[in-house]
Image: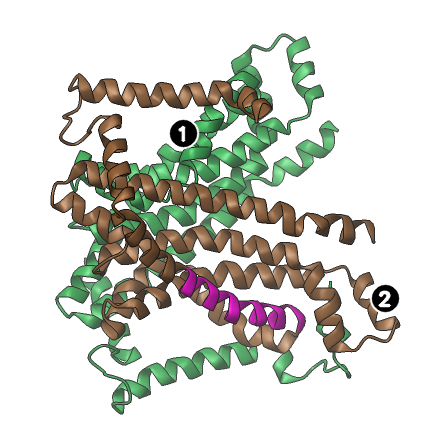
Chain colours: A green, B brown
């Protein structure tokens, strides 16, 4: 670690700017600017309403359940797409990681599809599924599958060959091998793929809703902008940020809670 | 080349099989060819649009925006990331702000930027800049912080001053991590650019795909998506190649030395 003191002349322990105080102060200043600049007409208040008005719109949106309902629609779509991606990604990744000829077969197709920006598929998905939830879910599932797949594949390939041999010697079938050895051992890789995909799911649900949906936060943002309900638009964007932050926190919490056994398990088995 | 083909033969056969399946499904009208035209037709239209310059022109317009936003993000966020990685007060100043803005899905700010900047070039460049900023900033910061203290101490013992240490030791030693941030950011730039063009634009490849769908020029729409897929693939391959050739020396130099 390079400490900041290494590069500065004198140490400055205990100074105010070494605490998190300055960061909080900067945020407060920015919020004050957000409040005051539009109030004094320094930015166009119609496009950039004061912070208090945006907060009021947010609270009203929550109170009238409008924002809560739109959020629920978005989260439910994102959740289903994400679940499908886990199903595809983990299954395909484990199988190709375990079976070399299978990975040979899928390799080129995966390398062609993986870097494809999923938003380029939006018009195709609209064509095939209309503006139903299937459209959002298919795009989310496509975009989220690849990080999970790649990480699972890496994890499954790096499982200690001795473990697999041992399980074989003790007569486990291929399915048992997959379920009891390969997937548990690859779990840390899988989890990091899951985490990348969670962020992607939120982005993709927003994008698909912005482009073609009649419900959900993404739609609500575009609709508020189009109908000049500007405080509501900002309120919806803030809610989206809160959802993103909250889901990430929830993920970290679950990871700490449920992955703690893994360290002990790996250590014991070596 | 021959060895490459031998190793990939099964994979290539599988892709050809999928293409054949596509052709069959469409020709036998299992899915309406109106929505799902045969592969050969898509490829023909793709070839025609590439030769007459329509697709390359749209792609070039998108590329201008992508690289504009990306390089702007590099120019601002790499120095900021170095400063945040090295100096506690800078880190403390900006960390809460970045943590607050980071969970926001970048496309969500498109409508806001549209209010202020309309649907011109500036809107796309700003949105792409925003989307690229966080991966670049965070990777630069982590890279700088992970530099082996021994390297820094050695340089200081030999009488290098602060700026020399940053330029000659810290920057080269964290280059691979900084580059990793660019590798994450560039595909994001491509995605966000397409979204921004679909939401509000008069041209660009994202706009092209959407307009073709709305006008029911379905093979043209698929051709546009195909070009985006190829672009994504080439970009990815190029970055992997750059990583090997430009950063390959890095591991040998900085990990052996410790």
Place residue A79 in its image quadrant.
top left
Query: Which residue is drawn at the image coordinates 71% and 71% (left, top)?
Result: B166
Q: Is residue B232 visible?
A: yes
Q: Magenta region: which residues? A: B67-86
The residue to which callout 1 is attached is: A87
Chain under disc 1: A
For the view shown, which residue lies furthest in the right direction? Answer: B158
Place residue B113 in its image quadrant.
bottom left
Which quadrant of the rendered structure holds the N terminus of chain A? bottom right
Report x, y in % for residue B47: 28, 37
**Is A170 situated above or below B222?**
above
For the view shown, which residue lies furthest in the bottom direction? Answer: A40
Q: Is residue A206 visible?
A: no
Q: Are marks 2 and 1 on the same chain?
A: no
In this image, B174 relative to B67: left or right?
right
> In the image, is residue B182 part of the stretch drawn in magenta?
no
Report x, y in % for residue A182: 58, 24
In this image, A108 relative to B240: left or right?
left
At label 2, counting other C-alpha atoms closer than 10 Å, the crowd grade (few under 14, some 14-19, many 20 or more) is few
**Is A260 situated above or below A45?**
above
The residue to which callout 2 is attached is: B154
The residue nearer to you, when weighing A242 against B133, is B133
At label 1, counting other C-alpha atoms closer than 10 Å, the crowd grade (few under 14, some 14-19, many 20 or more) is some
Report x, y in % for residue A228: 15, 70
Chain under disc 2: B
What is the distance, in whole Å, between disc 2 and disc 1 at their CAs? 50 Å
């Amino acid at each position: 670690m390079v400490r900041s003191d290494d590069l500065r002349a004198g140490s400055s322990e205990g100074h105010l700017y070494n605490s998190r105080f300055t960061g909080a102060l900067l945020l407060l200043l920015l919020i004050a600017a957000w409040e005051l600049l539009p109030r004094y007409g320094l930015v166009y208040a119609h496009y950039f309403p004061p912070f208090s008005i945006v907060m009021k719109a947010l609270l009203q949106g929550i109170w009238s359940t409008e924002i809560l309902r739109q959020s629920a629609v978005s989260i439910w779509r994102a959740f289903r797409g994400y679940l499908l991606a886990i199903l595809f990604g983990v299954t395909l990744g484990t199988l190709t990681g375990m079976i070399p000829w299978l990975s040979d077969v899928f390799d080129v197709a995966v390398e062609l599809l993986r870097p494809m920006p999923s938003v380029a598929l939006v018009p195709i998905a609209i064509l095939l599924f209309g503006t139903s939830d299937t459209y959002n879910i298919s795009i989310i599932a496509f975009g989220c599958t690849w990080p999970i797949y790649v990480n699972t594949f890496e994890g499954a390939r790096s499982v200690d060959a001795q473990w697999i041999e041992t399980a074989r010697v003790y007569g486990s079938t291929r399915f048992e091998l997959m379920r009891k050895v390969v997937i548990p051992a690859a779990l840390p890789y899988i989890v990091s793929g899951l985490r990348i995909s969670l962020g992607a799911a939120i982005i993709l649900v927003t994008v698909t809703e912005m482009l073609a949906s009649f419900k959900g936060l993404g739609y609500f943002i575009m609709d508020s902008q189009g109908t000049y309900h500007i405080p509501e638009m900002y309120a919806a964007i803030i809610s989206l940020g809160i959802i993103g932050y909250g889901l990430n926190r929830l993920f970290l919490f679950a990871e700490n809670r449920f992955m703690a056994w893994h360290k002990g398990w790996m250590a014991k088995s070596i | 080349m021959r060895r490459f083909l031998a190793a990939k033969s099964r994979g290539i056969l599988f892709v050809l099989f999928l293409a054949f399946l596509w052709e069959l499904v469409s020709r036998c009208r299992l899915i309406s060819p109106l929505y799902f035209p045969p592969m050969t037709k898509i490829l023909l239209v793709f070839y025609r649009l590439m030769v007459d310059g329509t697709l390359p022109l749209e792609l070039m317009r998108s590329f201008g925006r992508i690289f504009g936003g990306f390089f702007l993000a590099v120019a601002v966020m790499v120095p900021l990331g170095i400063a945040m990685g090295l100096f506690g007060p800078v880190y403390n100043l900006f960390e809460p702000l970045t943590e607050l803005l980071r969970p926001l899905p970048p496309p969500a700010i498109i409508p806001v930027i549209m209010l202020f900047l309309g649907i011109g070039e500036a809107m796309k460049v700003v949105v792409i800049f925003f989307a690229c900023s966080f991966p670049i900033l965070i990777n630069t910061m982590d890279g700088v912080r992970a530099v082996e203290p021994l390297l820094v101490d050695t340089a200081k013992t030999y009488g290098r001053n602060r700026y020399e240490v940053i330029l000659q030791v810290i920057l080269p030693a964290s280059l691979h991590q900084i580059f990793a941030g660019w590798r994450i950011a560039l595909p994001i730039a491509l995605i966000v650019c397409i979204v921004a063009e679909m939401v509000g634009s008069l041209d660009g490849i994202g706009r092209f795909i959407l307009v073709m769908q709305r006008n029911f020029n379905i093979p043209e729409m698929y051709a546009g998506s195909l070009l985006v897929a190829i672009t994504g693939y080439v970009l990815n391959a190029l970055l992997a190649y750059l990583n090997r050739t430009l950063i390959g020396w890095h591991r040998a130099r900085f990990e052996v030395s410790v």
